[in-house]
Amino acid sequence: MTDTHVHPVQPAWRERALIDDATYRAWYERSVADPEGFWAEHGKRIQWMVPFSRVKEKNFDENVSIKWFADGQTNVAANCIDRHLASRGDQVAIIWEGDDPNEQKKVTYRELHESVCRLSNVLKDHGVNRGDRVTIYMPMIPEAAYAMLACARVGAVHSVVFGGFSPDALAGRIVDCGSTFVITADEGLRGGRKVPLKANTDKAIEIAGNNGVAVEKVLVVKRTGGDIAWRENRDVWYHEAVERASPVSEPEAMNAEDPLFILYTSGSTGKPKGVLHTTAGYLVYASMTHQYVFDYHDGDIYWCTADVGWVTGHSYIVYGPLANGATTLMFEGVPNYPDAGRLWQVVDKHQVNIFYTAPTAIRALMGAGDAHVTKSSRASLKVLGSVGEPINPEAWEWYFNVVGGGKVPVVDTWWQTETGGILITPLPGATDLKPGSATRPFFGIKPQLVDNDGQVLEGAADGNLCITDSWPGQMRTVYGDHERFVQTYFSTYKGKYFTGDGCRRDADGYYWITGRVDDVLNVSGHRMGTAEVESALVSHDAVSEAAVVGYPHDIKGQGIYCYVTLMNGIEGTEDLRKELVAHVRKEIGPFASPDKIQWAPGLPKTRSGKIMRRILRKIAEDEFGALGDTSTLADPAVVDDLVANRQNKK
Ligand code: ATP
Ligand code: MG
């Protein structure tokens, strides 16, 4: 990828920032030279019921085992709520913005405390104990956060399943973790449309029952008041139960390594994995990254647009911000309802200072035109963040210049469900920005690039991204399948955590995620990331989004197959196709010349908005019989269209 120009730290960012470049370097050096000392100190950022004396216990070899602060005891909900009552009981903890722009609600820390205590008692009254798994299948309403925090308070392990998932996907997750208690709502509301959550739950419970797991209780939040089926003795109205419950609840003293939650990965590369995170290390890492990556200051209004069904929602809507006593905004709706200006209207309405979203949303809003953005003020913004996929420089620049008016730093944060929190990222007051690069490692993170034989690559290099030491937020196992954990992450390169992502390190030591290793192209011996070709395509004015995969090619080994979504109103002509080929040759080089370009009105994405290249690869390879696990696919119709119009027909 050609180095785009650098955006240096602006004086205003540095003045405001908690961490400047010299501090970043000093802390980073210490964090990797003396991890025990560094984390012993930062482990104290949370409140302990029993202090820890042990810090890091890590084995990345055969008997993989990871423990942090193992002899300490704490409670995550107490850290996110009770701890703040004395100093900020009347401060707003959660701003809820409804799907309908006229609906909103503000919840103070004191109100949050009461709601979570009552719900904790409901859970206990129904026999939910420490270690029991509770499935949460909810719309983006404050009760979703209450449910997570109530589980944490009583020591139950939550498994949040995104409200957009089907009954089958929900059932699979209920069965996988053996969860007999489900919290849901009658219906959800997204983009003006109703989502039949309770009906889906009923179906999922039936499927789970046929697969050996009998759900005993379903707690139902009344969101829309729509018609739903009711099963006496199993279904319980949330509002009735919490009203009857006591508002007094003592948080359980949890061991640092007790499980906090299970969360299934997005399924971009295969069957989702049940990632298990534990209590103390996770909270230390989520809260610390939230503070420094977003340069969070007391009083800032913080908004992450993710859904609580994804890890971003766990770490950066609920746990990180609340542990820091922040005001966190929860948005029920979607970016294009009632129109494509919604996000910026919400920014103005609630005077949002820190805004965190995904490239898929940025590209979609970019495609909808600048006018939707520029009619808002956005003067409150201080930091913009991106997560989920590589952000192509074109979209980065648009985010920086149009959304941020060129005055606000963009933090491109690279991390995974498995990592619990952000691992590679700029810090707003410390890091000169390069569009498209996640830049430098966070404190305590030791990235390493290796070639396919596991040889360590030094200096500027392109390879497979591994992390060589543990950090507190790291996942501990795949729930119920430690062997899969070891196989997936620690067997490819001995003694290292393998991320599955390809990555380039430039001469300044900046990291550029080039895409999944499985997606790396090898064309006539030239290795390149799908992200590089996609960026080149998207940098053309006519292109809104692109996905690139390899397919078998007689001469080159692999050919480059591009699926291209055009900007609104642009027609895919033969001339445009030629122009795009020439454009990629100019941007990257003749070796990256696309072999096939297919116009794609839509791309297959996971429900979290990531492009599923493995499906595109199958289509390009002519193997639609074997599309693999499609349970997390957002819109199956997109795939049918692509199959019908593929370019490889002989
Ligand atoms: P699965 O593991 O089931 O295939 P998934 O990897 O999409 O699904 P997540 O944990 O949600 O599940 O996503 C993590 C991945 O997202 C990373 O490994 C990386 O490929 C990509 N990613 C996340 N943030 C960034 C970023 N800032 N830049 C580039 N890639 C990113
Ligand atoms: Mg993954």
Image: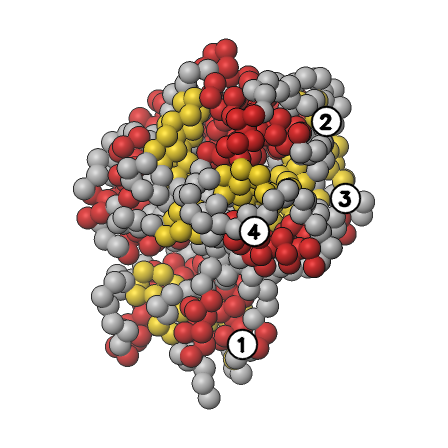
Q: Residue at x 70, y 50 (%)?
A: 214
**Element type at mark 1:** helix
- Between 369 and 204, which is closer to the camera in this rendering? 204
The residues bearing labels 3 and 1 have C-alpha atoms spaced at a distance of 37 Å
Crowding near pointer 3: few (<14 within 10 Å), some, many (20+)? some
The residues bearing labels 4 and 1 have C-alpha atoms spaced at a distance of 31 Å
Q: Label 1 sits on what residue type?
A: Phe
Q: Residue at x 70, y 59 (%)?
A: 210
Q: Which residue is mark 1?
A: 624
Q: Residue at x 63, y 32 (%)?
A: 123
The residues bearing labels 4 and 3 have C-alpha atoms spaced at a distance of 36 Å
- Between 423 and 204, which is closer to the camera in this rendering? 204
Q: Which residue is mark 3?
A: 64
Q: Label 3 sits on what residue type?
A: Val
Q: Which residue is mark 4?
A: 201
| Residue 26: percent from left, percent from top | 54, 25
Q: Which residue is mark 2?
A: 255
Sequence-wise first label, 4 or 1: 4
Crowding near pointer 1: few (<14 within 10 Å), some, many (20+)? some
Q: Label 4 sits on what residue type?
A: Thr
| Residue 617: percent from left, percent from top | 52, 70
* Drawn side of residue 295 relative to residue 118, left or right: left
The residues bearing labels 3 and 2 have C-alpha atoms spaced at a distance of 20 Å
